[in-house]
Image (cartoon, coloured by chain):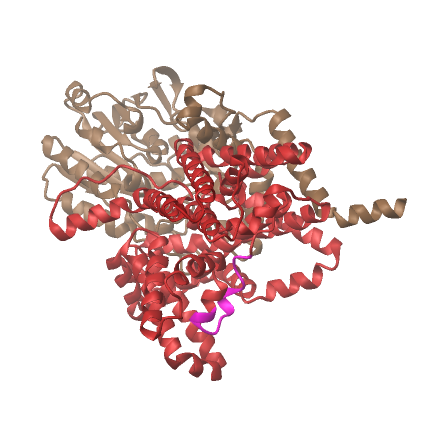
Amino acid sequence: MIFSSLLFLFWFMPVFFLIYYLVPMRAKNFVLLVGSMVFYGWGEPKYLILLVISILVNYLAGLLIHRFRGRADRIVLVCALVFDIGMLFFFKYINFFIENINAFTGSNIAEVNITLPLGISFYTFQIMSYVIDLYRGKVEVERSVINLGTYLCMFPQLIAGPIVVYSDVSTALKGRKISASAIEEGLCTFTLGLGSKVLIANNAGEFWRELEKIGYENISAPLAWLGMLAFTLQIYFDFNGYSMMAIGLGKMLGFEFPKNFDLPYISSSITEYWRRWHMTLSGWFRDYLYIPLGGNRRGKARVIFNLFIVWFVTGFWHGADWNFILWGLYFFVLLMIERAGFAGFLEKRKIFAHVYSLLAIGFGWMLFAITDLKQLAVYLGRLFTGGVSGSEVYYIRNYFVIMLLGCLLSSGLGNKVYDKISKRKGVTAVMLTGILILSVAFLADASYNPFLYFRF
Amino acid sequence: MVIDMYQTVKKNIFTIIFTLMVFVMFAGYLFGDDGEFSVTENRYLAKRPPVTLSSLMDGSFMKSFELYTEEQLPLRDGLIKLKAVCCEAAFKNENNGIAKGKDGHLFEKLINTDRQLKKNSAAIENFAKQTDRDIYVCIVPNSYEIQKDYIPAGFPGISQREYIEELYDELSTYGNVHTIDLYETLIENADKYIYYRTDHHWTTDGAYLGYRKLCDEMGIIPVDKDSEKLGEKRRETEGFYGTYQSKYRGSIGVKPDTLTYYDIDVAHYETGGREYDSLYDTDKLDIYDKYAMFMHGNEGLSTVESAEDEVEGRKGELIIFKDSYANCMIPFLTYDYDRITVIDLRYYPDPVKELLKEHEDADILLFYNFMHFNEDNHFYRLTS
């Protein structure tokens, strides 16, 4: 199930929240667990079993780490991690490896017939944070399998983040207060996220899809540039919209989820960009990969190596394909250049710095969006040699409002306006009601409503 | 006390609005009457599926339930309209793939060919190879390709003419295939009312142009629609909104069409196993989908027996493989053929070979509009 669907809004929400608010606190986790199972199992009932196994294995590993503290806890941790990463590897990457082994060695290993379980990249990282932090002594052992299951399955962040580490919510899992003002705030955030997704991301995405249909080899240079802008906007409003909906729903349930985006497109360097984009993922890699590798404490060469690993894995995490690895390494190279002194140059030239960052981000998204490397080369070629076709007029007329709106909102102007009017309850309520009704209207007639981050 | 209430409401105003909206819609689903049929979309809507263990296990229940929530959404029609109005307000002139041009003309946008196009071309070639009987092939370009003065600025539709010519070139290697190119004649009349503004079909006047060109190629004498005989049979019905409008749904500057037909008599008409004494289903003129009045809609097999028998140069039998574009043209052909067998391959599962054997002296005509030819996947049945 996805948040931006009529099913979620008008069936899941009323039924689930009615029950959730009516039952006493001690039953809330159970209701949340069951509700989340329904939410997850709706689209992929067969992969529910995978989720349950993951909960049970890590729950047991947690108990064992606690029981054999100082003796065999390391072995248990390693076993749990091998299991978690193994599952992720098998379900997400096995065919990629088979394909490439076949291509390089000429062997003929049959591919496995599996589809990617929804959200496996996200929930694997979440549950790993529990066993690792437990081993490190940063969190207490979770003795209730319901609580641990609730943490892992909680429907707001189960499928596409934000990546909530166990320590973020361990206290709230045991007991939480749900205030009317939290519900109000949560619904506001949810509705803004819904609008981001349905009104902006879907419409910008429509243009991107249009270029795919025309065929990259047929598009003109202006269309190629507009396409880059459209995808850049789509993925931000899609993913940030999803995160906002998750954060809002979390608030309504009594949880505080971490922020996932902080106006990434206003960055004046790629280094800054990655502090603002998908913050919970960068945070996870920092805490559970970069620092364990030694971070920046083992000399210059080692730092570069560590960063290389982190960015290779970041790229690969986003998808089992070469273009995603390329995308990760692309950022590694840019970050290295900035580290080597370019950052200082950028600092003194603010306008140039913004232009450079936006272009670098946009090119990055092309690496990300076009999985076929040959097609990617065609697209990048059209940016400079596409000429003009005449159909630009048509597309500009149809999409300039949405693009302009997207640019303004991602520049932070939207936040400023919202902060101003949020002091006036009436105005905010009217605006949010408008967004809600419009979102429903667009969903009522939507032919295009994907979540980009569902592929991960 | 009152002030407290006011403060509480004010503090939680959006919670109240959101909750109300969600529960009203939820109640609408639970207690409202499910719509059976969407008039504007001309199709049946999904109903709430029954829960069964097997449909739960294989996930088909979830899929049909989701479809049900979309199609039975309370206030659905109004909400879809609201979206269309918003798009117009944002200066968009396209909604759901339909673009509004000048003077209230709507156009369907085709920006690339379908993979099916090549397969369909090949299917026609295979068909031509299998027989040495004369085959007439006519692919009608759609409105945006012809009415260039009315399309919106920069309209990105592909050139249908190129693809039609490519097909005709390939077919020209077969001596028994005669292609009918309507491009010139339609372009010459582009400023006339030859395509509906709000529907994907051509008008009866457009179809008449096609008919004349067809007659030229087939060596028959066309009936004159302006003659006294035919002129007095002309009928018009106003207030026709077609399929383009049911997708576009905007309201600014969209004008309803006038549907025209010639009340041509036939001796006998049989379609979909039922017999009629007219080619026209005039009851359809009172509903949304008025174009369905021609030939009583699309059926797999129809046969027309002409009421005329005195026209000069008449021919015996014709088999037409066609889509709905032919429906408003076929009546004219009854002046030239005693008997016409009409096949819509989408709904005709029987072997075509048998049919051709049964009518071994019949002329063969393939008559399709480009959009249909581009994407329909039933052409393989030609060689069945």
Residue A160 painted magenta = no
Q: Name the residue nearer the viewer: B327 or B158.
A: B158
* Res. B237 in view: no
In which quadrant of the rendered view does residue B269 lie? Answer: top left
Query: What span is in magenta?
Result: A259-272
* Res. B15 in view: yes
Q: Name the residue nearer the viewer: A90 or B171.
A: A90
- Chain given the colour brown: B
What x and y, as percent, mark residue B146?
35, 51
Q: Name the residue nearer the viewer: A145 or B128.
A: A145
- Residue positioned 65% across, 64% down in the render: A417
Q: Is residue A138 above or below residue A113?
A: below
What x and y, as percent, mark residue A175?
64, 42
Q: Name the residue nearer the viewer: B178 or A432.
A: A432
- Chain given the colour red: A
Tell me if A194 is positioned left or right of A357 in this view: right
What x and y, as percent, mark residue B229?
38, 30
